[in-house]
Amino acid sequence: MRNSSIPKIMLVLALLAAAVSAAPAAAPKRPNVLFILCDDIRWDALGCTGNPYVKTPHIDQLAREGVNFRNTFCTTSLCSPSRASILSGLYAHAHGVQNNFTEYPTNLVSFPMRLQATGYDTAYLGKWHMGENNDQPRPGFNWFVTHKGQGKYFDTEWNVNGAGGKVIPGYYTHIVTDLAAEWLNRPRDSAKPWLLMIGHKAPHSFYFPEPKYSNSFDNVWIPYPESAFRLGDKPAWIKDRLYTWHGIYGPLFEWRKQFPDDRPEAVKDFAAMTRAYWGTILSVDDSVGKLVGELRRRGELDNTIIVFMGDNGLLNGEHGMVDKRTAHEASLRIPLIVRYPGLTPVTKPASIEKQVLTVDLAPSLLDLCGAPELKKIHGKSFVKLVQRGDSSWRKAWLYHYNYEKQFPYTPNVRAVRTDDWKYIHYPHGDGKPDRHLAELYNLEFDPDERHNLIANPKYADVVKDLKRELERQLRATGLTAETDKMPLDEGIKKELPDQKIR
């Protein structure tokens, strides 16, 4: 009896095995996305990007296990336009957010909207910074926590998912991190992937580190950069800016109480400002460590695309300037690190030298998540570039910025950057010839842009080629002499900006 049943059991097992092998394989779970966005972080403010003083072990770990995009740039170095470009894959003139006071258009599809529409649970926590006086939820997110204006490093008033303003005591970076951890651990459908975007205030001015990091760099000697004193071949507006809100002899975001001050000993105020800026980044690194630890505890680390980046760069004394907005390297260049084993194995990290832009994030994330692409955008997915190389990848791109009456310290800017060269010019806004000297830099041999070659006849042909390239880039993004509208450059002014919008 027992022996006669064995063949039947074996037959049943064989049939079951055949059925399993014939069944279609379960679809792989779509990746989660943790997007960590810093405000005004310089590309070189991290250990993994070469800073000798700022220790960022948790961010460095992401770079060691993921992709470090070493030449990443914003297409407009200003918070709101750049953030809108990250969301949409479009240049500022196309998405319409050309200053820090304009809302992201509700009818313009962003990558979070696209992910939400394809089944992602979406959340945004932190500094939104598109619409100064609006702290209400925005389209594309199932959960939205933000505040009005810039927020404060301590005791910000938060609007938690439309419930109204409420002060949450504590340090901004820790508050937004705790809110993120709480959201991750809320009951949810485990089958649904999620997108969590975190907008840090740090390291935006005014710089206030948390107490434990307030004196971390007291023993670091910090001079003005050498380029601050090499202005002989620069356009006059850069020299005019020295004594303004955006110059090294100005108030330095209130770190200098008596200004203007061009005495050599006044560098102490510049050093204090820089130390405070660095101190805020240490807390961001702590935040990254906590969130990565949370993903590991939840068993979601290797199925999560972790993006760490900045919205724009920051001039910290280069060419005598502070803040951003200009087309110089410190203003344009940002850190970008992406950790996801589906992009590149953690055992085989990558360092990408090709020029990647803020407008590339939206198409790249949708590509990695298997979501429908956004149509008619300016950005391009970097997935192929990372995984197989991309011979068609850009070798040149457009930068543009429009003069702001609220911050009258930078002219209109139109520039083209190639792998080796940069050409910058400053249209006045009335269609007449430029009134400011243009700039030309050989980035291969002069990465710090010390020598403006625009007046050197040896490079006349280079200038002609770059002007033609700039025209091509303008046309490619929909800008022509007829459509490229800009405000009139009213000159560099000495008045401080309104207290409410600093």
Image: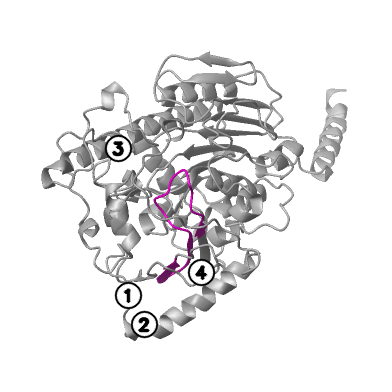
Q: Which residue is mark 2?
A: 459
Dot 1: what SS?
loop
Q: Residues within 10 Å of mark 4 (few under 14, many from 20)?
A: some
Q: Residues within 10 Å of mark 3 (few under 14, many from 20)?
A: many
Q: Nearer the viewer, residue 178 or 139?
A: 139
**Badge count:** 4
Dot 4: what SS?
strand
Q: Which residue is mark 4?
A: 396
Gap in Å between the C-alphas at discs 4 and 1? 19 Å
**Does 389 appear in magenta?**
no
Dot 2: what SS?
helix
Q: Which residue is mark 1?
A: 453
Q: In the image, what residue occupies the spot 33% across and 38% down? A: 56
**Percent coordinates x, y for residue 77 in the rendering:** 47, 51
Figure quadrant of the C terminus:
top left
Q: Are marks 3 and 1 in contact (CB under 8 Å)?
A: no
Q: Are marks 1 and 2 in contact (CB under 8 Å)?
A: yes
Gap in Å between the C-alphas at discs 1 and 2? 7 Å
Q: Which residues are magenta?
A: 400-425
Its colouring scheme is one colour
* Amino acid at pointer 1: Leu
Q: Nearer the viewer, residue 120 or 138?
A: 138
**Percent coordinates x, y for residue 366 in the rendering:** 66, 48
Q: Which residue is mark 3?
A: 278
Q: Nearer the viewer, residue 82 or 353?
A: 82
**Image quadrant assignment for residue 495:** top left
Would residue 284 appear left or right of 101 to someone viewing this image?
left
Q: Residues within 10 Å of mark 1 (few under 14, many from 20)?
A: many
Mark 4 against mark 1, which lies toward the viewer? 1
